[in-house]
Image (cartoon, coloured by chain):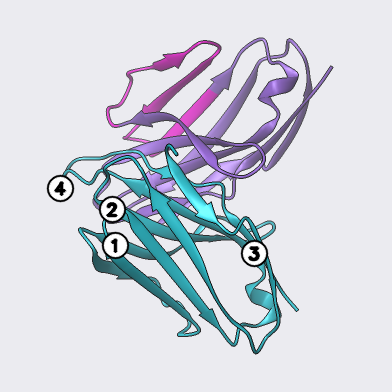
Chain colours: A cyan, B purple
Amino acid sequence: ETGVTQTPRHLVMGMTNKKSLKCEQHLGHNAMYWYKQSAKKPLELMFVYNFKEQTENNSVPSRFSPECPNSSHLFLHLHTLQPEDSALYLCASSQDKGQGTSYEQYFGPGTRLTVT
Amino acid sequence: EDKVVQSPLSLVVHEGDTVTLNCSYEVTNFRSLLWYKQEKKAPTFLFMLTSSGIEKKSGRLSSILDKKELFSILNITATQTGDSAIYLCAGHGQNFVFGPGTRLSVLP
């Protein structure tokens, strides 16, 4: 496997279900991100992990719970979601070289989530 | 609040045309401006721009940054149907802020 992988690629869940999205990066990066992409809206940053520490939580509802057990893996645990949470969830990784520098992100293929 | 605006939001051209996509940004502690291409799912990286006036080029694609006017453009010359995609612009400051994208459709 190369790059950034995400599973599952498609997920349909009811509002009372609990599910998890998984992301794995094979690039040796130290930062990982969750984004939400809804139709006709910009990519919304949800969470950032840097060296396994959460550094950003962009006012995301508590029904979304991230977990980063190591620098290669990132999970997004979902519970009691709402229909408006239906979207494409993208994971990305990057090599953060510190303040003042910049770097590109590499994205996974995304998980298309439908909440019924 | 950091903001990235792109124009046009949608563009339809014919093969062989040249297109210019626009991106303006307001990003605190600005580090770079990035361009991505999104076809089916994952955005793929195109360019990262940190300095004004220096053109980045890759084949038929090129991009330039104006840090005084807080503006960047992405040019695509001799467009092909394979260029059809959403082109995303992102500002990197404290974090990454994405614009809404420009949906480009290239007709044969």
3 and 4 marks in contact (CB < 8 Å): no
Would you identify the image quadrant in which residue B75 lies? top right
Q: Which mark is residue A57?
A: none
Q: Marks 4 and 2, how far apart in space?
A: 11 Å
Disc 1 element: strand
Q: Residue A49 got which mark?
A: 1
Give the mark, 3 or 4, whose residue is nearer the N terminus. Answer: 3
Q: Which residue is mark 4?
A: A98
Q: Earlier in the sequence, mark 4 or mark 2?
A: 2
Task: Look at the numbered disc 4 and give the secondary structure of its residue.
Answer: loop
Instruction: Please name the residue shown 56% across and 43% down the image.
Output: B42
Mark 2 highlights which residue? Answer: A31
> x and y percent of residue A36 in the render?
54, 62
Query: Which amino acid type corresponds to the residue marked 1 in the rendered image?
Result: Tyr
Callout 2: chain: A
Q: Which is nearer the eye, B74 or A75? A: A75
Callout 3 crowding tier (Cα within 10 Å): few <14, some 14–19, many ≥20:
some
Label 4 crowd bin: few (<14), some (14–19), many (20+), radius 10 Å: few
